Image: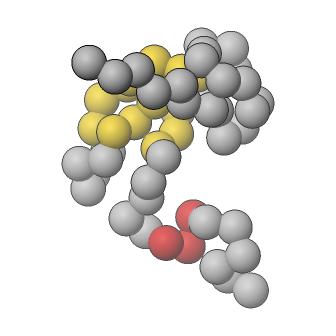
Amino acid sequence: MAKVDVKCSFCERTGSAKKHGQGKADHQRYRCQMCCRTFQLDYAYRACHQGMKK
């Protein structure tokens, strides 16, 4: 089993994220233990990425 260190997209800390269920498009969701926010590494809705709305 390989372990992947996930970096929080809000507080930028590595290794503080735990799995937190699935998103609507079956992407893995994570919850940061430090800032208590949830995020995904891959989004089905591409406007979530920076620079897409410009």
Q: Position of residue 34 (x, y in %)?
A: 68, 14
Task: Tell me if I can see residue 26 in this picture.
Answer: yes
Residue displayed at 47% across by 44% down: 40
With respect to residue 27, does 10 lie above or below?
above
Q: With 27 as the anchor, is 15 left or right in this view?
A: right
Residue 19 left/right relative to 32: left
Quarter that holds the C terminus:
bottom right
Looking at the rendered image, the quarter that the N terminus falls into is top left
Judge by depth and name the residue closer to the eye, 17 or 20: 17
Q: Quick check: can you spot residue 36?
A: no
Q: Number of callouts in the render? A: 0
Q: Is residue 29 above or below residue 32?
A: below
How was the colour assigned to the protein in this rendering? secondary structure
Q: Quadrant of residue 32?
A: top right
Residue at point 76%, 30% (across, down): 11
* Among the 4 quarters of the image, the one containing residue 42: bottom left
In the picture, measured across the screen, residue 36 lies left or right of residue 25, that is: right
> Looking at this rendering, what residue extends furthest in the bottom direction?
54
Give the residue at the far front of this rendering.
2
User: Going 53% across and 25% down the picture, which residue do you hit?
Assistant: 5
User: x, y (%) of residue 51?
Assistant: 72, 76
Instruction: Decide: is 24 above or below 54.
Output: above
The x, y position of residue 18, in whole percent, is 45, 18
Q: Residue, x 43% and y 68% (percent of image)?
A: 45
Residue placed most toward the observer, 39 or 16: 16
